[in-house]
Each structure stands twice: as C-alpha cells, then as structure tokens.
Image (spheres, grey):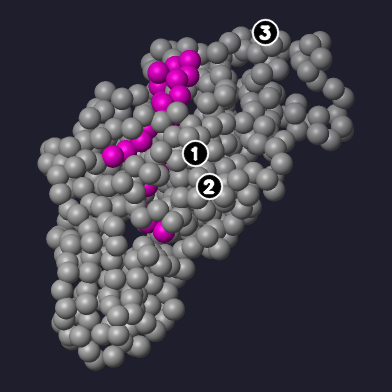
Amino acid sequence: MALLKDISELDGVKLGQDLHGFAAELYPICRSITGDGIRQTLAMIQSRIPLEITEIPTGTQVFDWNVPKEWNIRDAFIKSPAGERVVDFQKHNLHVVNYSAPVHATMPLSELKPHLFTIPEHPDWVPYRTSYYKEDWGFCLSHNQLMALEDSEYEVCIDSELGEGHLTYGECYLPGRSTDEVLFSCHVCHPSLANDNLSGLSVATFLAGLLSRRDLRYSYRFLFIPGTIGPIAWLARNREAANHVRHGLVLTCIGDSSGFHYKKSRRGNAEIDCAAAHVLTQLTESPEILEFTPYGYEERQFCSPGFNLPVGCLMRSVWGTFPQYHTSADNLDFIQPQQLTGALRVCAGIVDVLEENLTYRNLNPYCEPQLGRRGLYSPAGSGDLDAEINARLWVLNLSDGGHSLLDITERSGVAFSLISEAAALLLAAGLLSPVTEDEEENHSGTVAREIATQCPVAASSGIDR
Ligand code: ZN
C-alpha cells in the first residue's frame, strides 16, 4: 500500500490545511458550465499539476446535445429607490441565477418576485439555482432579505453575456506502464460551493500531484469538467480513450463530516466497486455502499449503456440529502481539513489496491509447498505472524490463475494489504508467477462469474438513496 503509506508519513495537519487552502483559493470564483470562471479555475489547477485544456466551440454537436453558449458575468444587483444595492452579486456570486441572460430594467416588486428565489425554512441562506438550458434570469437571496423588500420600484441589472464562445475542460494525463487507464472525474461548474465540489477538485488535484511523481502500473486521467455536458463532450471526442478506462471514480462532496458513501458502477461488481468497498471498510467508520442509479454526477454519462464504463462515485454526504446542499451554507466552514485528508487517504488506498491487484499462478499446486524450509513458516502462537502465514496460505491456495489478489481478499476476509504483502514474498520465493493480461482475458468469463458470487459488494445490503 505504497501511496497510502507515503501520505501517512506526511504532516497530516499541514496536508489538511493545504487541501482546505486550495479549496479556499477557488471558492470566490463565479464558475458555470462555460466561461471565464472555469478557465480561471483550470489555470489555478494547472499551476499545480500538468493540465491540458480543451475548448470546444458553441454549437458543436456532441451525441444528442449541442455545446451551449458561453456565459460570462461582470456584475448584477437589485437597487432600491434610495440607490442601495439590496441584492449584490459582488457580495456573493450565488445571488444571481447561474447562466442568467442579461437584463437591465426598472420594475415593481410584484413583477420582480417571480424572478426571486429563497429558502423559507433557512431564512439566512441563499440558494444556488441555474438556468442552463432555458434562457431566463433571476436572483437568489436569503428569505430575510426578501421579507425586508418594500413594495416599491427596483432597478434590476444583470450585466452578463450569453454568446458564441467555448466549452472548456481540463485533463491531466499521467502515463503509466500500461495504456489501460484509471479515470478520476470532478465537476468544475459550481460557483461558491465548497463540498459540492471544491472538495473534489482539491483532493483530485493533490492526488494527481502525488501520482505524477510515481512509477505507475496504470495510466491515470483526471478530468476537471463541467457537469453533464462536460463528460458528454469528452466521451464524444474520446471514444478511443474511453476504451482504455479500466476503472473510474467520480469525486464529489468529500469534505463534510459525514461518513463515506460509495455508489457502485452500473456493472455493480466491477473491480473498482470491490476495491472501493474494501478500502472504505478498512479505513473508515461505517461506510455505506449504494446501488447504481442513473442520476447523480458524471457517472450518468460514463455508465450510459453505450459505454458502460466501470465508474463509481465516492462521496461523504450524498448530494441532495444534507440541508446545506446547493445553498450558501455549503461554504468553507462546512468542509474541514481533516475530512479532506481522509478522502485523499481513501483515494490513495483505492489506487494502491488497483495498482497491486494482480493475478498469480501457484507454481507448486500439488499439496502445500514446504514454507518452513523457505523461512515463510514459523511455529504457531506468534500473533501477527499467524495472520501473515494465514494470508500466505490463502494466496497459495487461490492463486490458480483465475483469482486476483482482490478476489482472494474478498474470499478470505483478510485485509488486501496483508494479501498483497504475502504475494510479494511468495513471488520472491519463486512460488508464484504473475498471470499475463492475455491469460487473464481468456479467464475473464470465469473470473467475472466468480466475482459476482464472491464480492460482498455484489450481495451487500447497501441502501439506495
Ligand atoms: Zn451540485
């Protein structure tokens, strides 16, 4: 568990502060699905990791969709007759319905009201609203602000532009020994909202930074991409690259104090599903495994039937289930440094499992090899050593070319780290040989069937959201 071990050796307090600090740098920017807010955000990520930026012109067809207009905003306000800005975009970018068309008019409160949005049950909070695919305009404000508005004429101004431009996304590709890829994806289209999804952006950026300095089995691709239209556009332009995705994870809402939730891929028993469930069980308190649903984040596109990629979604709180969701209360106080560090550790643990999850063949399959002669067996009763010997026996027994180390972990109930260490020792002792990818392909039918029955994820009682 090499990456997780490296992270454990870092100064945890400083790491948490750095993760939170990067989220805080990104927080003030007014992002949307297109426009300069995304460009500015990607430039800040690019100052930390290698990032290739793609711009796709407005109107470009991507599968059943068209790249929408580019949106940019300079200012917006509602001004009272006394000239006071009673709602001010400069104070909080959530005050404007994201993607609002420009407007400049004076109107009575009765005419303005249909364009105003509040949360009466949380009268101090400002909601987050968008109007992406229907041209409209509006303001979001606290319910208290609304209640304080007198019945009068108001000057309303949204100084925005909706026009020909581009959709922008960023991609960090880290080549490994294999062209098979692990995909991480985060949406980058929300304005000042911390858990959804600056938490994901910050953790993904740090994870990519750590991986960029390592020798890797897989190639890694990190997508920083606007929701829905972003992955649709990426998939439309990268059908070949999509074929290389062996495992994938969407990161969102991973900075709050809830326990973890992992939403399985559409396949339900993919290696990423087993790896994520195992790592969460090992590293965190009472994680919950959720069945796939065709709603949520980028996994909606990656797991569409034409692609059916093995991509799951890692969250702490599940979107839509916490009161702060899509409100001004999803701010920098709602995410904590130690929770971000915890999320980075889980991602690292998953990467370690994927990197180390090889399949071996026992070269001495007729009865047990004599481990004592090789210094791999000691007299019983020595605590940890018993656990190590147990792991060795499991690896030897199930390494028939059809069980990966993760399969052995699931079947034995022994931690993956112990199984992986045992395999390394047995390999060094000449008792195992790795199974090549081609051999694995030939076996894949059997393996898939066996995983379906063994992997506790497949049979778990995970709750549906
Ligand atoms: Zn959201």
Q: Which amino acid does label 3 sit on?
A: Gly
Q: Which amino acid does label 2 sit on?
A: Phe
Q: Which residue is drawn at 35% across and 24% down?
A: 244
User: How far apart are labels 1 and 3 at the CA level?
Assistant: 39 Å
Where residue 444 appears, as percent x and y from the top left, is 40, 23
Where residue 59 appears, as percent x and y from the top left, is 12, 41
Q: Is residue 427 left or right of residue 140?
A: right
Q: Does the residue labelled 3 lie within 8 Å of ligand 1?
A: no
Residue 430 has which mark?
3
Where residue 201 appears, as percent x and y from the top left, is 46, 45
Residue 27 inside the magenta-drawn segment: no
The C terminus, quarter of image: bottom left
Q: Residue at x 37, y 82 (%)?
A: 145
Mark 3 neighbour density, 10 Å: few (under 14) some (14–19) many (20 or more): few
User: How far apart are labels 2 and 1 at the CA level?
Assistant: 9 Å
Q: Give the range drawn in magenta.
A: 168-192
The N terminus, quarter of image: top right
Residue 22 has which mark?
2
> Which residue, given by chain and number where applicable, does mark 1 sit on?
205
Please name whichever residue, 73 or 334, is drawn nearer the observer in this view of the structure.
73
Q: Earlier in the sequence, mark 3 or mark 2?
A: 2
Question: Which element type, helix, strand or loop, lies under badge 3?
Answer: loop
